[in-house]
Amino acid sequence: MRRTVAVLPLFNEEPTLARVLDEVRRWAQGSSVLVVDDGSTDRSPEVLRSYPDITVITHAHNEGYGQSLIDGFAYSLAHGYDAVVTLDCDEQHEPRQIPQFVAALEDADIVSGSRYLDPRIGGDDPPADRRQLNEEITARLRVLTGYAITDAFCGFKAYRAGALRRMTLTEPSYGLPLQVWIQAAHHRLRVCELPVPRIYKNPERRFWGGLDDVDARRQYYEEVLREEVQRWPLS
């Protein structure tokens, strides 16, 4: 059996954190759970203390979504896990799907959730600017990588440890998934998508680091892509 760890980046998710952790523990039975607390300033750390069986990495200050994943990956590899599942703490992802993601690793190196792969699943309407920008960047990635992906930014993923070992992930903010796609294509990793519902409990959620403006996010994502393609040529 694969040794699996669920990695959850966390920043100020006190209202939903306990429910998410309860569901992750329910559906990831036999797996470890690691929370990377990215400098939360609400009562999230207090909630975490009521789960002594969960490992917690704490950032002294907010270092970014991408850095939380990078630190979670480093811990997972250092402790000999064979598979890593990532999901968020805001109830945007459904932990009941964790077994599907792990099972799909039998035939893939990276399994990525998609909110747009199967229209029958449906869900909440995404904020228009997020949907448009996701479509733009996803289309760029299809051309660059040859992967027939439909959702560039879903944080619900599963990775073989061997795939993570081949990557050099350095982007501390929201552009980290773009590094994953480009480096996966460079190394010719096998990727697949699994459909997940669209869940937007907080459509007004902010993008930290000055990225609330859609044009600023677009410019930032394009810069990450340019740098990654230079570092990891695609043939």
Image (cartoon, helix red, strand yellow):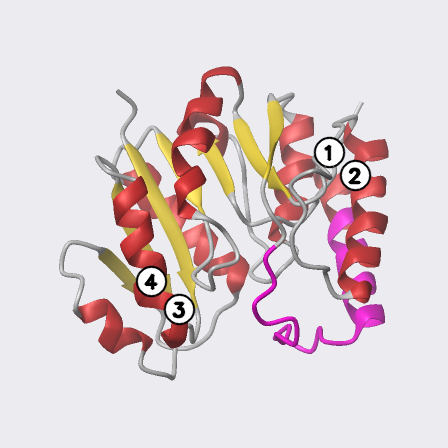
Report the span colored magenta.
Answer: 199-226
Left or right: where 40 falls relative to 203 = left
Q: Within 10 Å of the Cα at label 2, are there few (<14), some (14-19), or many (20+) other Cα atoms?
A: many
Q: Residue 89 occupies which quadrant of the picture?
A: bottom left
Do the CB atoms of the residues marked 3 and 2 lie less than 8 Å apart? no
Left or right: where 30 falls relative to 172 = left
Q: Secondary structure at mark 2?
A: helix
Nearer to us in this view, 235 or 140: 140
Do the CB atoms of the residues marked 1 and 2 lie less than 8 Å apart? yes
Amino acid of disc 3: Thr
Q: Secondary structure at mark 3?
A: helix
Amino acid of disc 2: Leu
How far apart marks 3 and 1 lie (CA) works out to 29 Å
The residue pinned by badge 3 equals 16
x and y percentages locating residue 215 in the rendered image: 85, 70
> Mark 3 or mark 1, which is nearer to you?
3
> Mark 3 or mark 2, which is nearer to you?
3
The residue pinned by badge 1 equals 149
Q: Secondary structure at mark 1?
A: loop
Which image quarter holds the N terminus? top left
The residue pinned by badge 4 equals 19
x and y percentages locating residue 91 in the rendered image: 47, 60
Mark sitting earlier along the chain (3/1): 3
